[in-house]
Image (cartoon, rainbow, N blue to C red):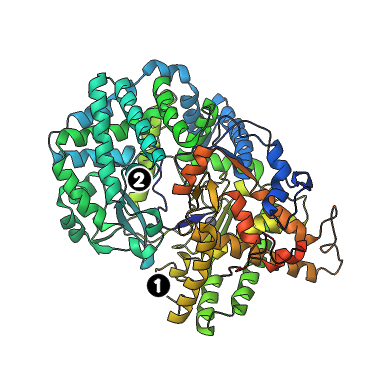
């Protein structure tokens, strides 16, 4: 039941956006920064640079039992969890001087940590919601109920949200889109390979167990599970796959509200819009019209009882993590099948995540007060400037792009805004009621707050100050509609950003991250948006073709990389991220070279612990992506995650870079020297 609508369409992030089923968090030491101790010197860097940079890290690292993977994102997440826990325990303890923010975050955390009370209540707190669904008498009334669920809980059947108009980014409009699935991707319902078939068996057991816990007989529950799988499979069949959805043009179907309503009459969309409390509007965007046309038939052919079973399931599943132990356990068992995670996280970690997901800018405000200084922001601003300058030069020098397109590209580059650390204005949660003894009610009320906030934006000007990630988040993003790059305070820590380290290491870490986000403005998706964030083609036809040729090289390169067993990466799904990694590395190194050249003291150019600045740049880059994944999780990521695994985020990039080969003295024919090196940006 956590808010999940924000920026559905056009955010490209650095790390793990797509891993929504793979909850984060665990319990080892705080994140160490860069160190040459992670290097495995028995490996030739020109043969396998990732192994060279991360070999000793991998020998020592163990995936904590409560995590599906271990990497710098999780290392930092772990230390953040501890900081946030401190904030929340203090806020929950109360006492004099507790202000309104501490009351909200403290009591939400406190209601979550009171496991005894939660266990005693069993399913009782959810009963009124399930009774509402059970009481529905016809399919029109079912849509009213689905609308209610959309506001206070998950989103059965389809997604409804607001976002900037693809053709007029300054205005927010209503969107409806495909949705309503419980497994991580449509492939889980449709594909017939052994592992997906096996996952569906796990899924049916999971649904069946949950309905049993909710009071159905074993026989009823087994029937309910079949119904849920049948309906969700029909939704999956009507859904567009992830790779096709990468092209914003495939999601661009602005139409009159009346036409959208007429397209799928069984959805009773007018009734839905009224029931969710949407303001009146005349036009909207339908992400995938085919989905609505096809599911219109499903709503007709399925009985009212079957549809009610499906909606009840959605309600039950979303609430399960916040119900008593048996629900929590059943829910975790499914996660385990998907990710290989051995143990559920400690309750306090799940509760910290709940507060971050529900009242994130309130908790974030406290987090920033504790952790983020003005100095960090200043140094970041300087680096962003350096990276923008270097991308500008790179564009100027491109041999394959005409002056006309270059001019447009530079206009777009100059228009990119940046946000660093935390929002100027924090979200005001004063209207949300948080009660110390009502966990599920709190979850519903914070979800309702967020749903209504999203809905209220329809037909209003875009608020360009808004943030799509909370301050403690260890991630970064580029948003095409806002044409902005955003770096929450959470990522401005070692090994990404280390005040005690030389510039070379920082340019390989956070410098590359900045370059990565900037390059997203010009990847296969980002290049389709103009400086204001409108979906508009500013390329000459010839340059567009040249671009496509160059990104095809990247898609082919990554398509042969093996993620786990015999499973290869999807080069088209990961294309934007791989393009951003390659472009980011090039422009970050270029910015470093400028810094070395401009430094009159010669300090920037010196060797440290035997490594040149260029070598330290690549080592810093490698360190950021050192990781271990459980095989189950690695498999899930191939299907759902647009980012490549760490090994290929490193090796896939360096093998394309003559600068790398020069820095390490690699020779033609060695694995880290690609025969047909790809070069977009
Ligand atoms: Zn990215």
Residue at 48% in and 43% down: 635
Split into 4 quadrants, where in the image is the N terminus?
A: top left
Query: What is the number of the mark on residue 536?
Result: 1
Q: Residue 300 in the image: x percent, y percent?
A: 14, 44
- Residue underneath mark 2: 191
Does mark 2's beta carbon lie closer than 8 Å to ligand 1?
no
Q: How busy is the neighbourhood of tag 2: few (under 14 within 10 Å), some, or many (20 plus)? A: few
Residue at 25% in and 42% down: 147
Closest to the observer, 61 or 66:
61
User: In 3D space, how far apart are the residues under numbered discs 1 and 2 (Cα atoms)?
Assistant: 35 Å
User: Is residue 496 visible to the viewer in this orientation of the structure?
Assistant: no
Q: Among all residues in the image, which is located at the extreme left?
A: 138
Closest to the observer, 226 or 469:
226
Q: Residue 156 in the image: x percent, y percent?
A: 29, 41
Residue at 23% in and 21% down: 219
Q: Among all residues in the image, which is located at the extreme bottom?
A: 403
Is residue 617 left or right of 155 when viewed as pictured?
A: right
Q: Quadrant of residue 665?
A: bottom right
Q: Residue 108 in the image: x percent, y percent?
A: 47, 30
Is residue 154 left or right of 496 when viewed as pictured?
A: left
Vertical relation: 211 (above or below) 417: above
User: Is residue 443 visible to the viewer in this orientation of the structure?
Assistant: yes
Does mark 1's beta carbon lie closer than 8 Å to ligand 1?
no
Vertical relation: 66 (above or below) 587: above
């Amino acid at each position: 039941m956590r808010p999940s609508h924000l920026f559905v369409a056009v955010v490209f992030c650095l790390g793990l956006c797509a891993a929504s089923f793979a909850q984060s968090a665990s319990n080892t030491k705080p994140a160490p920064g860069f160190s040459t101790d992670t290097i495995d010197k028995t490996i030739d860097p020109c043969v396998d640079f990732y192994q060279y940079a991360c070999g000793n890290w991998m020998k020592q690292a163990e995936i904590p039992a409560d995590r599906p993977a271990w990497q710098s994102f999780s290392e930092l997440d772990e230390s953040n969890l501890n900081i946030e826990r401190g904030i929340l325990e203090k806020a929950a303890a109360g006492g004099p001087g507790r202000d309104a923010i501490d009351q909200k975050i403290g009591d939400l955390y406190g209601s979550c940590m009171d496991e005894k009370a939660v266990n005693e209540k069993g399913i009782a707190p959810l009963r009124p919601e399930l009774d509402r669904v059970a009481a529905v008498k016809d399919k029109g009334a079912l849509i009213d109920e689905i609308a209610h669920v959309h506001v206070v809980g998950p989103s059965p059947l389809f997604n409804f949200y607001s976002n900037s108009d693809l053709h007029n980014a300054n205005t927010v409009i209503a969107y409806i889109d495909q949705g309503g699935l419980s497994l991580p991707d449509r492939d889980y319902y449709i594909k017939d390979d052994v592992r997906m078939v096996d996952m569906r068996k796990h899924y049916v057991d999971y649904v069946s167990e949950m309905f049993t816990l909710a009071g159905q007989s074993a026989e009823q529950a087994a029937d309910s599970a079949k119904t849920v799988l049948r309906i969700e499979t029909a939704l999956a069949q009507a859904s567009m796959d992830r790779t096709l959805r990468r092209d914003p043009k495939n999601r661009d179907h602005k139409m009159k509200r009346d036409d959208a309503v007429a397209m799928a009459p069984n959805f009773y969309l007018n009734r839905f819009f009224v029931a969710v409390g949407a303001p009146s509007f005349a036009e909207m965007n339908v992400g995938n019209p085919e989905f609505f046309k096809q599911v219109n038939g499903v709503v007709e052919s399925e009985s009212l009882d079957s549809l009610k079973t499906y909606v009840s399931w959605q309600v039950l599943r979303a609430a399960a993590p916040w119900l008593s132990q048996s629900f929590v356990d059943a829910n975790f068992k499914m996660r385990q099948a998907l990710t290989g995670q051995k143990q559920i996280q400690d309750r306090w970690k799940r509760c910290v995540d709940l507060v971050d997901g529900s009242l994130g800018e309130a908790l974030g405000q406290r987090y920033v007060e504790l952790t983020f200084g003005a100095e960090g922001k200043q140094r970041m601003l300087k680096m962003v400037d350096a990276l923008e300058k270097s991308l500008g030069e790179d564009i100027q020098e491109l041999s394959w792009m005409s002056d006309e397109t270059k001019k447009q590209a530079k206009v777009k580059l100059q228009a990119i805004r940046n946000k660093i650390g935390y929002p100027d204005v924090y979200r005001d949660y004063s209207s949300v009621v948080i009660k110390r003894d009502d966990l599920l009610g709190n979850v519903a009320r914070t979800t309702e707050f967020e749903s209504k906030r999203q809905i209220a934006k329809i037909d209003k000007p875009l608020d360009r100050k808004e943030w799509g990630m909370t301050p403690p988040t260890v991630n970064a993003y580029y948003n095409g509609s806002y044409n902005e790059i955003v770096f929450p305070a959470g990522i401005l820590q070692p090994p990404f950003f280390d005040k005690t380290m030389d510039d070379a290491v920082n340019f390989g870490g956070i410098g590359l991250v900045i370059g990565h986000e900037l390059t997203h403005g010009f990847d296969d998706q980002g290049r389709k948006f103009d400086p204001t964030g409108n979906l508009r083609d500013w390329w000459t036809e010839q340059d567009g073709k040249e671009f496509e040729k160059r990104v095809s090289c990247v898609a082919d390169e990554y398509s042969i990389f093996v993620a786990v067993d015999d499973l290869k990466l999807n080069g088209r799904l990961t294309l934007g991220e791989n393009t951003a990694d390659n472009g980011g590395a090039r422009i970050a190194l270029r910015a470093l070279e400028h810094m070395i050249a401009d430094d009159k003291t010669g300090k920037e150019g010196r060797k440290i612990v035997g490594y040149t600045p260029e070598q330290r740049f690549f080592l810093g880059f490698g360190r950021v992506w050192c990781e271990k994944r459980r095989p189950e999780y690695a498999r899930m990521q191939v299907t759902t995650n647009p980012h490549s695994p760490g090994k290929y985020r490193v090796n896939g990039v360096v093998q394309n870079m003559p600068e790398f080969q020069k820095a390490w003295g690699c020779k033609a024919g060695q694995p880290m020297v690609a025969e047909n090196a790809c070069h977009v940006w």
